[in-house]
Amino acid sequence: MSAVTYFDTLPTPLGELLFTSDGDALTGLSVEDTPAAGAVRSRAKLKETVAQMRAYLAGELTAFTMPMEQSGTPFQKSVWEELARIPYGETISYRQLAERVLKPLGSRAVGSANGRNQIIIVVPCHRVIAADGTLGGYGGGLWRKQWLLDHEGK
């Protein structure tokens, strides 16, 4: 793993997306953020990732295939892995997510882990909604969550 953090940006209907990488894997994707001090812009290191995001936003891609690496606790990582299994255009509730990670009474814990997801859209935390069908929360703003769900036809 490289000690250098690479970044690139992409203007989108959601705002400017900021991609970060360790040179081998996508390590972060956020909206309207600024690169960490010392990060190096590299279109080459993030070329495939940005291309996949462009295809997703154009409605031409429903599953991402780039390597990803997030730092977090084993529980958080289990939640993020389960998020990545939610099919394009589908939603689940926080309770269902808790059941899938074998914490049936852990809706709040999975909600917290969901909120710490550092690779939005690609690790589709926007596909988790409240049990009553309302949007629940979204760190990037509920309008972005609604946009993503509408984009996916949900």
Image (cartoon, rainbow, N blue to C red):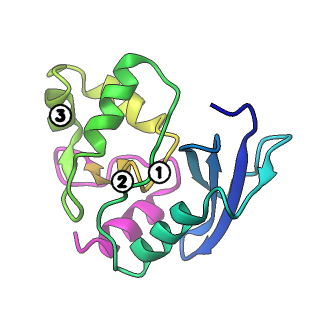
From the viewer's perspective, tell me whether residue 26 is left or right of residue 135: right
- Above or below, 149 against 34 in this view is below
Q: CA distance from mark 1 to mark 2?
A: 8 Å
Q: Position of residue 8 (x, y in %)?
A: 69, 60
**Element class at badge 1:** loop
**Can you identify the residue that label 1 sits on?**
120
Q: CA distance from mark 2 to mark 3?
A: 15 Å
* Among the two numbered marks 1 and 3 on one chain, the one whose residue lies closer to the N terminus: 3
Q: Position of residue 123 (x, y in %)?
A: 39, 48
Quadrant of image for the N terminus: top right
Q: Which segment did they paint magenta?
A: 129-154
Neighbours of disc 3 within 10 Å: few (<14), some (14-19), many (20+):
many
Q: Residue 7 magenta-drawn? A: no
Q: Determine contact: label 1, label 2, CB under 8 Å.
A: yes
Q: Position of residue 121 (x, y in %)?
A: 43, 56
Name the residue rendered at 49%, 23% in the picture: 72
**Which numbered mark, 1 or 3, is in the foreground of this view?**
1
Q: Amino acid at mark 3?
A: Arg
Name the residue rendered at 22%, 69% in the picture: 154
**Element class at badge 3:** helix
**Can you identify the residue that label 3 sits on?**
95
Q: Amino acid at mark 1?
A: Ile
